Amino acid sequence: MNQKNTNECVGGPKLIFACSGAADVGEISDRAARNMTRDGEGKMFCLAGIAGGIPGIMKKTEAASKILAIDGCELDCIKNCLPQAGFKQFDHFRVTDLGLKKGNTTVNNENIAKAVAKGKEMMVS
């Protein structure tokens, strides 16, 4: 698959791909991306569509001016999935790198806010 450099199109959308896995840190990642979308920081987008090679999703992602990948844990599912689909340039962080432990973290507004703050910081850098 011939993919474009995802940062070439300066006027394109800012897309956020988030872990939505079964663990608590996956839920925090997902909810952080939804909050960032609500706050106008970017648009949460469909990782399953990337993995499935859905043409419309691939095309919109190719046109993105910025891509943020928020993984829940060190398995780095998003960080590994995007390059397999041809997307090499994106910003990335893990919820567990914010001091939260997989399987031992309460999903609450405070922990979601930590992930949102990190995501917003990365969207401007």
Image (tube, rainbow, N blue to C red):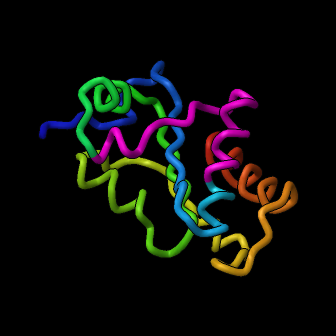
Compared to residue 5, the image places residue 122 above or below, namely below
Q: Quadrant of residue 63?
A: top left
Q: Residue at x 26, y 32 (%)?
A: 54
Q: Is residue 39 magenta?
A: yes
Q: Position of residue 57 (x, y in %)?
A: 34, 29
Q: Position of residue 47 (x, y in %)?
A: 41, 45
Q: Nearer the viewer, residue 22 or 95?
A: 22
Magenta region: 30-51
Q: Is residue 36 magenta?
A: yes
Q: Position of residue 72 (x, y in %)?
A: 57, 65
Q: Nearer the viewer, residue 3 or 100?
A: 100
Q: Residue furthest front?
A: 22
103 relative to 46 in the view: left or right: right
Compared to residue 99, the image places residue 37 above or below, namely above
Most prominent secondary structure in the magenta stretch? helix
Q: Quadrant of residue 102?
A: bottom right
Q: Quadrant of the C terminus?
A: top right
Q: Nearer the viewer, residue 28 or 74?
A: 28
Q: Residue at x 52, y 61 (%)?
A: 21
Q: Residue at x 34, y 51 (%)?
A: 82
Q: Residue furthest left?
A: 1
Q: Position of residue 76 (x, y in %)?
A: 44, 67
